[in-house]
Structure formats: structure tokens, C-alpha cells
Image (tube, rainbow, N blue to C red):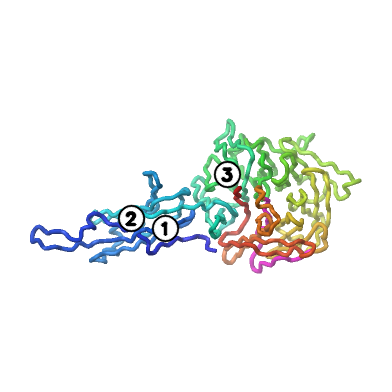
Amino acid sequence: MSSTRYINFKTITLGLFAGAMLTGCYRDMGNYDLKDVNQIAVDSLLGIKDVYQYDTLRVTPHFSATQDTAVLQQKDRFYCEWYAIINGQNSSIRLDTTRVLNTRINLAVGTYKLLFRMKDKVNGNMYSLSQGGLNVVSGTYEGWLVFSDVNGAAKLDMVNFLTGKAPAITKDILAASPDLPKKLTGPRDVAYMFSNTNANTVPAPGHGTTNAADKEWIYICTDQGAWKLRNDDLTTKWQWNTVHEFTTKDSATFHPAFVGSGGSTISPSYLYLHDGQDNVYERYNYMYYGNPINIVSGETKRFKAAPFIGRHSKLSVTAALVLFDTEKRRFLRYSPTAGQCTVPTTDPAYMPYFNYNNVNMDLVWLRSTPFNSLTYAVLKAADNSRWLAVFNISTTNVQDKFVKLTGPDIDKATHFAIDKNSGALFYSVGSRVYATSKDYPDQTYMVLDAGQEEITLLEQHVFWASKYMDVAPANRGNYLMVGTYNAATGNGTLTGYYPADFVNNHAALTKTESFTGFGKINAISYRERF
């Protein structure tokens, strides 16, 4: 799939005739001989249909002359302008100043007229005509948000799905926000956030307010800071730097690692952020961030929180988060608005697998999943072996499994994902993806070999809207999304696979969709529609 759509109208009209051009001859008052005028004509712009927002629109007008065609080759003789005229208004937006229109469309969604103006700098003649229905279609309506690294720069693209149209990729969306640093580097995370509340203002001494009625935002985190984007056209401004949702943070050093969990909303009522410096913050009722929540009740020193938050949006609003203390190597429980964590009770009589308060292993990866509301944690033991702890302390206190992982190169695994339908654990090493199970840890199957391409992302996205979460294979909530990168070409690809069940079909993957033309994919999310 092409990463940029060029709309070429090679025979489209402009039918540009100045008043002088409409006269076929003039009268020489000296000798009364009739002399033909060199009439210049430009084809019209009929038939223009749709152009995606942020795409490149290219229009090549065709000129003709009744006598001296050589004048058409004198490019410096003519000054050209292209304008988009907003339907029903007298205002216009200049698009370009070249004879051939070749410009990125940063217009709001809507219908426009296209105006071409050309001035002959020799004789002063001006030719202009507005014509043609230019329909700017949303390039960010619904679909995958892909945050990737392109030669060190952070690039946000979107695979846009519109009913009745083929999927299209909207490129370099952040270029539409001039307030962002140039160049923006170090893509960390992108996350679509939905809230049930409408409080989106920052109280005094806050630095900027946003639309209080807006319940959806897109957050991006980079090495240079974090911003939230409008949910419609994904633009931002300086006031929406996430640091302005705090009252005490220093913007020069505040570079969050991620917002939410795995590109998803953690809770419909609260927003959670890891600052990349061992701290987790809660935005209570979507108003503003207060003090870090990584402190245990009864203790005075804040613990160093691992860069993972165990919770997903399908849980009730009162369900707890799972955090991990990297120093004392323990799992902790945080109830929304509590301000402090607690240590889950470990009773050997009915929880024989591990001690929450002292796992005695380092955390490698953690994710909570809708599969029985379980949290999966991959742990590293002192002998470099890998273990899988499966439990639920969000809605109850249950230990499900604690097993040693024995799959090929598991100690070298760089990315993990959980299938919400079967509970299968996927992990990647280099160009290969493997699948294993908490119930059959001695069985591991290679389910994908990407050849010369590196696996840069594994993700099964947790959606907020229920329509994405049905178990039917066609629903994207069931897809295992795999990001691959070809270092030789600098090209990244995002591919969706439907995983089969583990017991009977060994989690075999069936390809469902694929999109290419990205950089090295670091994170994905999904802009939902309800």
C-alpha cells in the first residue's frame, strides 16, 4: 500500500479566460487591419472528488495558446497561486504559488472550491476562476495509530478506515502541529484515551484549559516530552504539553515514558502516567495529576515503580492497579483515588505459588488482560531463567500459576503479548515469534518467522468500545499486531494476525491485514469510533 496518495488530475479543468482573452481580435486604429490575439487557455478543474486530510494533492493544469505556444514555456513570465475557498464563506486559504499544485492538505474536513489565479507579468493580464468541488475527507477518522522512529525522528502515522473506502495511510500527522519541537525525537508511546467524565480543565495555577466537553484524547510520549492531541484531527498546541496537567512539574525534565497501558485506556474515570523516572501518577477524575502514587501505606519512602501498569479498561471503576517495586521486588495493589499502595495478602494455605511481598525476581514484562481479568508477569530469576506469574489482585486475590518458561531463547525475548481469548503468551526473539501457555509451559511453538526483518512490536490491543471486543475473527480486538522492520530499506510494516486456540491449534497465526511504509515501529494504539 502506498504511504502517500497523490491525486493526479491530468485532464481536469480550470477554463481560465481573462476578459482580454475572450476577444478574438482587436482593431488597429492606424490601418484598420484586424490582428489575431494570442489567446491562452487553461483546462478546467471538473471532476475533483475526495482528498484525505494531510495527504498530498497534485494538480497539473494543461495550457494552450492560439498562436505563440512558446510563451507557455516561459515559466518566469507567470505568477501562479492556488487557493481553497471555504464553501458558504468569503474566506480562502492559499495552498501554493506554483503552476503545478503539489501540496500537503492541512485543511479542516469539509467541502471547498479550488481557485487558480495566474498573472502575466509582462502584460499584466490576470486569469482566474474558482471551480470544482474539493472534498477534504478525514485522514484520522478511525484506525491504527503507528508511532515509529525514522532516522531518529518521531513520526506518527495512521491507518485510516472509512466505510466504503480502502484503508489509507495518513503520514506524518505531527507535522500539522507547529508548536511541537522540530525535530521531535525518541518515540516512546501513543495512547488513545477515553473518559466517562468531562472534566478536562487544569485548575490554578494551571497553564492551559481544554474543551471540557471532550472525552477523547490521543497522548504521545517522546524523549522530549509528552502531549495530548485532539481526537478529530490529531493536532496539538503548547498548552497541551502533559506537563501542564501538573501544577509542580518542571517541563525541562518531564519526559513521560507512557500514558495508560499498552496504548489503551486503563480506566474510564482515571488517567495514569509513568514518568520514566520510577514514578506513577494518577489524574483523579481527569482534572490534574497530584502526588506520585508509588508509596506503600505505612511507609515513608516512595518505591521505584517498574515501567508497567497492570490494569485494563474493561474492569469496573473500582478495580485496582498492579504495580511492581523494583527494589524490594514485590507486587503491589493500588485502589483508585487511594493515594497509597497496599501489599496483597499471601496465605500459603491457598496461595502456594509465590509471595507477593517478596518474589525475589526482577520484572521483565507485565500486562493485565480481559482473559479472566488475569495479570501476566514475566520474571527473571538469579540464574537468568524466566518465570511466568499469573494472578488477579485487581478484583480479588487469586494466584493462578507460577511456572518456568522453557521456550527457545526465552532469555533473549524482547517483546511479549497475551491473547485475550486463550491466554496464550507470545514472545519474540529477533525475527521469530513463539507461543506458549501458562497451562502447558513445556510446550512452545514458533508461529511466525519474519526472515530478515526484526520484530519491533507485539501487541494485542485492549479496546474500550465493546464492538471491537467480540470473539469473532474479524474483530481487531482479537488481532495479534506485529511490527517488523527491514534495516536495509528502513521500512517498517504493521501486520495483524488472528491467533488460533493453543490446545488444539498451537496458537497458529492467520494473517488478517498488513500495512507498510512506516519507520521502526515503537508503539501503536487505535483511534476508536462508537
Report if residue 454 is visible in the image.
Answer: yes
- Mark 1 or mark 2, which is nearer the start of the sequence? 1
Q: Is residue 66 above or below residue 213?
A: below
User: Which residue, given by chain and number where applicable, does mark 3 sit on?
Assistant: 228
User: Which residue, given by chain and number where applicable, does mark 2 sit on?
Assistant: 80
Q: For mark 1, give the secondary structure.
A: loop
Task: Please name which of the two marks, 3 or 1, marks the residue nearer to the observer.
Answer: 1
Whether residue 123 appears in magenta in the rendering, the answer is no
Query: Mark 2: few, some, or many residues within 10 Å (few <14, many ≥20)?
Result: many
The spot of residue 170 in percent (x, y) is 53, 56
From the viewer's perspective, tell me whether residue 334 is left or right of residue 174: right
Whether residue 456 appears in magenta in the rendering, the answer is yes
Instruction: Provide the residue span drawn in magenta.
Output: 444-462
**Tag count in the figure?**
3
Query: Mark 3: few, some, or many residues within 10 Å (few <14, many ≥20)?
Result: many
Q: Are marks 3 and 1 in contact (CB under 8 Å)?
A: no
Which residue occupies the extreme right position in the image?
349
- Mark 3 or mark 2, which is nearer the start of the sequence? 2
Picture disc at residue 48: 1
The spot of residue 514 in percent (x, y) is 61, 62
- Mark 1 or mark 3, which is nearer the start of the sequence? 1
Give, as a three-letter code, the residue at label 1.
Ile
Q: Nearer the viewer, residue 100 or 474?
A: 474
Dividing the picture into quadrants, the one containing residue 80 is bottom left
